[in-house]
Image: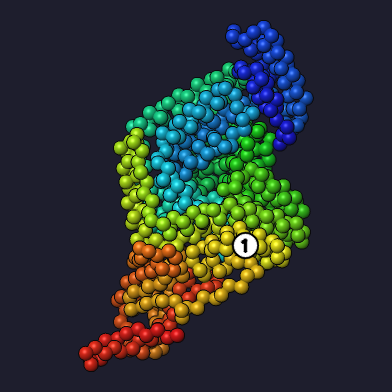
Amino acid sequence: MCKKNYATKLCAAMTAMSIVLSGCAQSTGKEVNDNSSSTSENQITEEANDKIAEDIEEESDDIIDSEDIEESSLTPTQRNSVNMLNYMSALTQEINASSGNQMVLEEAYSSLVNDIYPNAVDTETQAEITSLMDTIENYRMITVKRKRLEYIYEQNRAQALHQAIPNPVGVLSAVQSGNILKSAVSVLYMAVDSVSSYKAATSQADFQYIQDGWELEDQELTELHNSTKNVLSYMFDMVRDYDFDGDYALSEEAIKDFVKWKSKPDSQLISKIEWFQSHKDTYQDFGPYWLELVKDYYNSEDYENCIESIRQYESVSTRIFRKDTDKANVLPMVIVAAKETLSESEYIELANSYCSEIYDNTKDDDWSLRYFVAQIYMDLNALTKDELYLKEAYEIALGNVNVLVDEQRTLNKTYMEEIQKVEADKDSTKREKEEIKKYNKLLKEQRKVELPPVSEALYLNTELLFALANEMQVSDEEQERINAILHENGKEIFLTKALDNRFWLSKKIEDINSNKIEISFDGENLSIPAAYIAEGYAIQMTISSGKKEAQIDDWSVKKVKRPKKAKECSEFIVSFESKKAKDYKYHVGDKITIKVDSVADTPDGNITLNYKVKSSKKFGIFDGIKFERQK
């Protein structure tokens, strides 16, 4: 790995001259030709160019290991140019192949804006980045849909993580918990597919809305042509300007093949690995090739080659990103592979190093990767008994909570207010107007059955934070700091009382008294104040009739009644219905127990209701039954 980057000095000289220095490496021997520059400017340019070449030569040992220099005829400058060229070519092809996948487009656009290292960008690359951003923008749809997709995806991933590691202190209580870490890794790599990733959306209206408008249209075919044409011109310019062998630049066919084989499902894993191995000569200088092999070897449980592949990536990569998120995304696999194959001391050293890399190469919103790092630190603590690892895990959990808490407050505010419809801009296209119309309709339909929101990501990280805070016995001052982050001005962070009550430190919270809650039940319908239920609820009804028992758990939200002047969530009434309960034949004397979990798997704060079926008298005749609540 390079410790210093030649591009820093290169970019500084380029900025000072205000001209393009197309060939800055000593090996190119290329002269700068700019007729508009004065004689003095040319002289300064030549001196700066010579100085940069000297610096690059002096620092080449830091940039590429001596063994790699012997194997490659590329100078550091040329290698950096090759990496940038092939990365941009592959990204272009992946974008064109994913024009209907909103998550892929969003990640690609964000990477171009935030991740590219400015010092590694020359004029041609800048033009290609701008062109590619235009292509993505033309593929993308309206902002509101993208936000909806992102929310659903993040909720699904957080729920999956919670199921994979149901006990937030699982690693603390189990030494060398390899299975837990493997489960977490499997969730980190949930497929980001435009259909399968969202089939788990809680609302069918969501799914239908997401499906609409994903077909490739004529105008997108035009974008496909333009982007292919632009990246081809970009390749010619880079090879010419930096004077490296054209074989280092992957052809369009090679890029297409790489993207095609990269997207093969795990069911074809053996065939996929075989193809990558047989084409090593073509892709061995292409960093993403080795990152893909890291994943494939891991999935095939070939852990030794998984670790070797990340080493190969490190030998050919140069700094073209501010944060190498692609590498950070595969490092959890490498860490688990190391746990399976290396000695304990080797694993501790590797995991410690790569945990730091993951954290340094992720952003605040990459909470899931950082959550995994916290799990690794807890595992390292279990192995070494070093309390510093617990402290690292604690700081990560606290940082995630501090970032995610704003999302929950926004969700709360939106839930309590009237629906905020999206208005189309005057210059919106017909398609965009139709999208906005559909989105507003979706909001209206959702509001009828919408429960108090829960950011699953915040819930997951807060659980971890509290477990670590208790384990470390943090000070009263620190407990107050956590309370202040979660409960700004003493307000609840979760609208659901049972959930919010869980997340207070060193504060006596009054237990929920179900006898004081106004609840109604008539055999087939159940009504509960919204403050005692949330997304992800679970309702289980048990009917005891003599020695027989029946279970009914198909309760779904029928409607949420919102009085016009209501200011508190507890004033909203949620009505549930059950087909099984409706069809069930109740008998006088039946005993009914209804357990309401505000959030599934929440250990406390749940409501238990008891009813007894009695005969009812109408007009002086016993001709019916009623459900009498037992308190």
Disc 1, SS: helix
- Which residue shows up at 57% across the image and 27% down it? 85
- Which residue shows up at 51% across the image and 63% down it? 494
In this picture, is 277 found above or below 447? above
Identify which residue, 89 or 162, lies in the foreground.
162
Q: Quadrant of residue 594?
A: bottom left
Q: Where in the figure is residue 422, as x and y percent of width and height?
A: 37, 46
In this picture, is 203 found above or below 38? below
Q: Where in the figure is residue 90, as x and y percent of width and height?
A: 52, 33
Side of 620 relative to 176 (left or right): left
Side of 221 relative to 303 (left or right): left
Q: Mark 1 sits on what residue?
A: 483
Across the whole image, how many numbered discs are drawn on residues? Answer: 1
Q: How is the image coloured?
A: rainbow
Identify which residue, 429 or 315, lies in the foreground.
429
Question: In this rendering, does residue 82 appear at all?
Answer: no
Q: Where in the figure is residue 498, as x and y percent of width and height?
A: 52, 70
Q: Quadrant of the N terminus?
A: top right
- Which residue shows up at 70% across the image and 30% down it? 5
In this picture, is 231 found above or below 581? above
Find the residue positioned furthest to the bottom: 620
Side of 300 relative to 12 (left or right): left
In this picture, is 283 found above or below 355? above
Identify which residue, 266 or 529, lies in the foreground.
529
- Which residue shows up at 47% across the image and 58% down it? 412
Q: Amino acid at mark 1?
A: Asn
